[in-house]
Image (cartoon, rainbow, N blue to C red):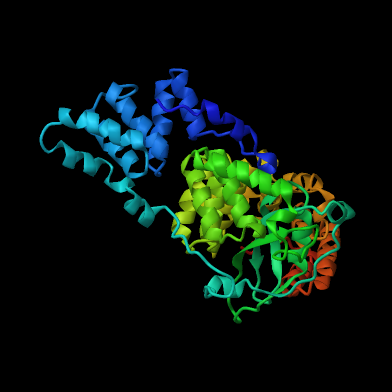
Amino acid sequence: MTTYKHRLGAAAFLLAFALSPPARADIYGAVSAYEKKDFSAAFEQFTALAEIGQPVAQLDLAKMYELGQATSQSDIYAYAWASLAAQNGEAEGKKLADDIRPRLAPGSERIAGWITDSYTPEALSKSLLPDLQAQKPGQAEEDEQAKECKWVKVTPPALPSAVTVNREEGEVFTEFTLMPDGTARLPRVVFEFPAGLFGPLVRDLILRGTFNKRPAGSGPVDCPGFLRFTNGSWNDHFGSSLQSYPRLARLAKRMQARAAAADPSSQFIYGMLLMAAPQFGADQAKGLAWVVKAAQAGLPQAQLEVGFSLLGGLGCRSDEAKALQWLHFAAAQNEPNAEVILATRALHGTPDAAKFEEAAGWLEKAAAQGNQNGQLYLAALLAAAPPPGMRNPKRALQMLSAQPRDIDDDPVLYEIRAAAEANQGDFKHAADAEQEAISRARSLDWDLSSLEQRLAGYQSGRAYYGDLLEF
């Protein structure tokens, strides 16, 4: 049985990436379960990982079939998975397949091929894996979503002295809702490194940014965003060499060696470094290829990143169907950002009651883990969701009171408060909160028509039931 014990040092060395403890299937947990002789758990996890293309899991699954551990002994299944592991680069897989082959009855090799036919690299490339698209600045054509989400004007807020003096480096992956008038709503930090340093700044940047206007009558659209900070600056993204950052260079060298030795945690870190740090001169597709390996090994944040990249076409061709599969993998392991993204996808378009229930379920899970976006969006549903049974304005106000002060500039916060107050019959406070929302929205050049309609309703003693999030 393959062991990852000698690699666990890299798993602990995640800096601020802080992978969430797995709840479903990852290669570390699968090997640990096997070593504890919990063969049922190991078999289940190896199977889940083998089916998404992880070669070590495919090899170990083959060994369990050969030995009949937690399953009926089957040379055909053992041969099938060993052959697939060999096809994916596991040399030991070829040796095991060669050892089993003489024991197979005539025709068994063809049957073995049928067993794993849906999980070959070719099959997974069609159904699951990103179509990597290497892009060089100025050479790649923008797809339609990239054009819609393009910045027209950027007004960066001042960076705190802790960032500029210490020449901090970092990156933030975001998602936001772009309105037809070219303004942004609901900026949400999907992933940031280091944690908690640049996220609030990026939220402010997006809220105050101006984007391409969309055709009249079109609805809102989700946009991915990716911002880098190098040398303690918003703007110094591409000019510095790797030699200017010796700590980054040393980290990359260690992670590259461990990634090449097939350690999933290091594959994730190294892939993110390639995607995020311009000093490496690598395109995003090269970095994403390493992240995909980590995702296939079951690391939930890597699965989140693959899903997010597929949604936005970051280093790959955008593909929502594939993205949703990876996001569900991550959510099955309680990755809160994946749960929030799945909730926003459920609310796209004109959601029915079932879609609202689905979104609320994902947001409840994210909020329970302390995820800020999960709490805020859940509060919006509790304040004014169209399905009456979902509304709980008292709880919505309690959730808003627990939100950090760094989002006080977002008009949506006051919109939610106003709807919740009105839903409790306190129309005076509802109108006050809505007026505050309008004041803040005006400073951001938002289209105020929907906010003013809600204000008129509160002033007339009418509650609002509808979509405050406009996904």
Where is the N terminus found, in terms of image quarters? top left
Which residue: 76% across, 72% down?
154
Q: Residue furthest bottom?
A: 216
Residue 284 lies left or right of residue 383; in this view the side is left
Q: Residue at x 59, y 71 (%)?
A: 137
Tally of numbered discs: 0
Q: Is residue 52 above or below residue 408?
A: above
Q: Give how far across and how far down residue 283 sits, in percent.
A: 56, 61
* Residue occupying image coordinates x 42% and y 41%: 54
Q: Nearer the viewer, residue 358 or 391?
A: 358
Q: Is residue 298 visible?
A: yes
Left or right of 172, for residue 139: left
Q: Residue at x 50, y 29 (%)?
A: 4
Find residue 450 and report its image quarter: bottom right
Question: Looking at this rendering, what residue extends furthest in the front direction?
Answer: 243
Which of the image's four quarters has the C terminus? bottom right
Residue 179: quarter of image? bottom right
Image position, residue 247 (x, y; %): 72, 46
Q: In the picture shown, does residue 84 fall above or below 164?
A: above
* Above or below, 298 relative to 73: below
Q: Nearer the viewer, residue 459 or 64?
A: 64
Place residue 22 in its image quadrant.
top right
Q: Is residue 5 left or right of residue 64?
A: right
| Residue 291 percent across, percent down from the top left | 53, 49
Image location of residue 445, percent across then percent down: 78, 75
Q: Residue furthest top?
A: 37
Residue toward you, 272 or 366: 272
Q: Of 149 and 215, which appears nearest the observer?
A: 149
Asked if residue 307 can be seen in this view, the reply is no
